[in-house]
């Protein structure tokens, strides 16, 4: 596998196919630590989508709607959506696109990619684990996974945590 290509051979632990994140059974959470202002904030995004392609190559991509940020404090949410921070009006989405997906153990993986915030790419490595694979009551194949990673965004430490169930759609 080369980190210079956008796609890699499918790691053996990822079942082949096209997988779509099931938003009802998934969560994208974050925590922010701003050492300059001694602020720690945790929250989640309520409106998101994601896809994992795992045929002969493996890729992952996703997006969150910035306006869906939720910290449990509406006034803070509005401030985070404002031009002071994420500027949801001008930059309505944050996007992720993988550069490399690799197995690090039988059920563990690493995804390297770019998180685009306000049209600027920030490199991030997510480490994760496959939690389960099974057919749902309707017979559709599902996979449950978790992954997390951290990045520095303009001097602020941001940690992302994804817990997701994905359904095979192809």
Image: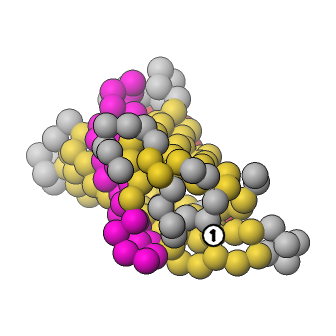
Q: Nearer the viewer, residue 16 or 111?
A: 16
Point 70% across, 78% down: residue:
134
| Farthest right residue in view | 138
Dominant secondary structure, magenta: strand
The answer to whether residue 52 is visible is no
Q: Is residue 107 left or right of residue 35?
A: right
Which secondary structure, mark 1? strand
| Farthest top residue in view | 90
Point 76% across, 76% down: residue:
135
Residue 60, image x and y in percent? Answer: 51, 48
Q: How is the image coloured?
A: secondary structure
Whether the magenta-drawn stretch holds residue 75 is answered as: no
Point 16% across, 41% down: residue:
155
Residue 130, image x and y in percent? Answer: 51, 73
Give the answer, above or below, for where 99 lies relative to 118. Answer: below
Location of residue 71 (image quadrant):
bottom left
Q: Nearer the viewer, residue 69 or 154?
A: 154
Per the image, the residue denoted by label 1 is: 143
Whether the magenta-drawn stretch holds residue 121 is answered as: yes
Q: Is residue 35 left or right of residue 16?
A: left
Point 80% across, 67% down: residue:
140
Q: Is residue 127 left or right of residue 61?
A: left
Give the total number of marks visible in the rendering.
1
The answer to whether residue 65 is visible is yes
Q: Nearer the viewer, residue 118 or 107?
A: 107
Residue 36, image x and y in percent? Answer: 11, 46
Which region of the structure is painted magenta? 103-129
Give the answer, above or below, for where 103 lies relative to 155. Answer: below
Residue 144, image x and y in percent? Answer: 59, 71
Q: Nearer the viewer, residue 63 or 13?
A: 13
Query: Are there few (<14), some (14-19), or many (20+) residues within 10 Å of tag 1?
Result: many
């Amino acid at each position: 596998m080369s980190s210079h290509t956008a796609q890699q051979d499918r790691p053996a632990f990822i079942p082949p196919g096209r997988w779509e994140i099931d938003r009802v059974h998934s969560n994208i959470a974050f925590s922010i630590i701003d050492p300059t202002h001694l602020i720690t904030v945790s929250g989640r995004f309520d409106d998101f989508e994601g896809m994992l392609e795992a045929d002969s190559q493996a890729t992952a991509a996703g997006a969150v709607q910035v306006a869906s940020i939720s910290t449990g404090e509406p006034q803070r949410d509005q401030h985070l959506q404002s031009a002071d921070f994420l500027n949801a009006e001008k930059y309505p989405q944050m996007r992720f696109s993988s550069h490399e997906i690799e197995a690090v153990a039988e059920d563990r993986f690493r995804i390297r990619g770019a998180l685009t915030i306000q049209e600027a790419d920030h490199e991030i490595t997510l480490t994760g684990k496959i939690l389960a694979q099974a057919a749902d009551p309707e017979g559709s194949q599902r996979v449950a996974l978790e992954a997390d990673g951290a990045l520095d965004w303009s001097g602020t430490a941001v940690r992302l945590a994804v817990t997701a169930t994905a359904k095979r759609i192809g």
